[in-house]
Image (cartoon, rainbow, N blue to C red):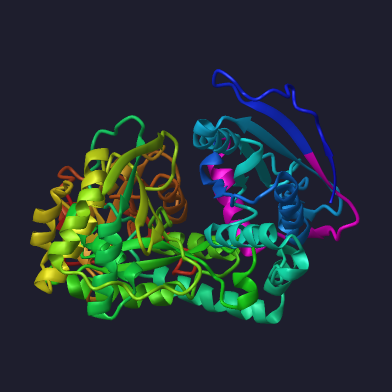
Amino acid sequence: MTGGTAAPEAAAAPADGADVRERVVLEFTGLDGGGAELTWGQRFVWDILAALAPHNHFISLRLRVHLPPDATRERVLGALHALVRRHEVLRTRFPAGPDGEPRQECDGQGALAVEIAGTTPGRVRRTAERDEDRLWHEPFRHAQEWPLRASVVTSGGRPRQVVLVLSHLAADAWGLTALRAEFLALLRGGDAAQVPPAGVQSRDRAAYEASEPGRRAGDASLAYWRQTLRTAPQTVFPNLSQPGERPLFPGTGLQSVALAAAAQAVAGRLRVSPSAALLGALAAILGVRTGTGAVPLALATGNRFTPADAASVGTYYQVAPVLLPVDAGSLAATVRAAHRASSLAYLRGNSDPREVARLTAAERVRRGAALGTLSTVNIAPEAGPALPPAPRTAAELRALTADTVLADLEGRDEEQLKIYFHVKALRSRAVVELFTDSRYLDAASARALLAGLETVLIELCEAGDLDLDRVAELTGVTPLGQPADAVVADHCRVSPEAVGALLAALPGATAARVFTEPTGEEGSGVRLVGYLVTGRPTTPEQVHAAVLDRLDGALTMAPHHYVLCRHAPARPESRAAWERVPVVLQGSGRPGDPPAAAGPTPTTDASPGA
């Protein structure tokens, strides 16, 4: 290792609660470097960072490693140096070109500054926590700096903990686990030659994704996206909103041995995975909250299908859409359905996010719905084989709930997601974080949801099954309101009155009304027909584009057919009255459909939407 060590500001031991700090610079030369396109996982994370900017530090990753008693300063710094040499993504910058397109640029030489914080034995944990929090809160400057920050906390003459903060562009949860294991192996062995290969490098991953096998894998995922988006509801919360709280997106954390044990017990009984047991319980509770029979979610996918992928530190993280059916009469059936649906989704989250965005935009125009992946479930995969769970009775599981901890987390006021449900661990102890839009799931309801997960899974173990009414009773989660005129149109619950108000608010509109009519297609609900009078020349295509820009993503969607009239009837609440008004143009407004035409509106069996 080549490096420079800055002298500490003070050589004496810390006193009166003060930490002694110095800065060590690890230098790197003569390594392989060069540029490449972003990997699909990096592109996915880049888009999230751009959407959250400038407050995008929330998705940076944190890791604290407790060091063995025989660790020395030189060996710790040597292991850090070896990590950066072995994994090129840790010395990679992500600049954007003049066209705004980002690239990964791996540096063959450079330096990493490592902070050394000396403290007293009783302050090691506090110092490490403060260093972690400080390094995490500062957003990465990806064009200028490497995506890794490090601090070493020492006490009594030896290093005690290492604090690492990484950009999500460099690693995901699985990669962080691989990084920790490799760091400890390097620390024990002191020789990188004794450590297994570093796995797929980031630029090699990008090259694979551009190859024919990579494109075939991406096409399979896109086909799954296309099929799912054709019938997916547009939101998990098609409900009336409540007044929001501050912060608008509160966070709640849960640590529970009982939940982990109950999920494993249910998994064994129903022959599903523990994550599917948890996912089914979550879907059931959300079904109680929303009153829907299916919950649309975006599942985080690991996309590590080979040993080389598993050894990689880089970020493979993406999402795949999934629709979880909720069986009102059987939680066991809901869990089994979650297992089937999620098993397929986890295999289909590996594609170019730009292609997914184009596909989603096309379906949004075709369906007239604000499709998006705004409710995400991230059940982090845990490396290594899982041990068989110890058999426990329902009474033993309930006894474990005495040690369950619920805590408030740092919320945020700016967020695009409706739900972010993050399971960090689910083996010996469940560690779960939940962030929610408080207009749909306030902080008290979020706590009830998290606590309810272990309650309903324990009862499922004891009773064999339970219905949705019992789930509601056990959790205390109450339903959100629905509009009085709510209907299902193209698998989405919407309010025709709200859609009519959206039409009426378009620039130049002087009158508008939306009616419903049956589609004749089983399960798809009704069809929306919008009548509109404007004070300026316009076409159904222009109206459709304007409506899409104003959808709320909850209870509105674009009409399936537009009828532009010369004037409003004397009785605007009557569909028959609208049908007697001269028509300027009518059509779906969708590309690829028959062009707008003038003439009378076909007589249909229609009912007023208001």
- Residue 111 in sight in this render: yes
Q: Is residue 170 left or right of residue 473?
A: right
Residue 210, quarter of picture: bottom right
Query: Where is residue 236 shown, x and y percent of the image?
Result: 30, 56
Is 50 within the magenta?
A: yes
Q: Which is nearer the eye, 335 or 432? A: 432
Residue 540, quarter of picture: bottom left
Residues rendered magenta in the picture: 25-54
Residue 403, relative to residue 135: is it above or below?
Answer: below
Query: Where is residue 558 shown, x and y percent of the image?
Result: 35, 54
User: Can you name the residue that lies furthest to the top here?
Assistant: 16
State the residue at coordinates (73%, 51%).
Answer: 75
State the residue at coordinates (68%, 28%).
Answer: 21
Q: Which is nearer the eye, 502 or 449? A: 449
Residue 398, quarter of picture: bottom left
Query: Where is residue 327 shown, x and y percent of the image?
Result: 17, 70
Is 596 within the magenta?
A: no
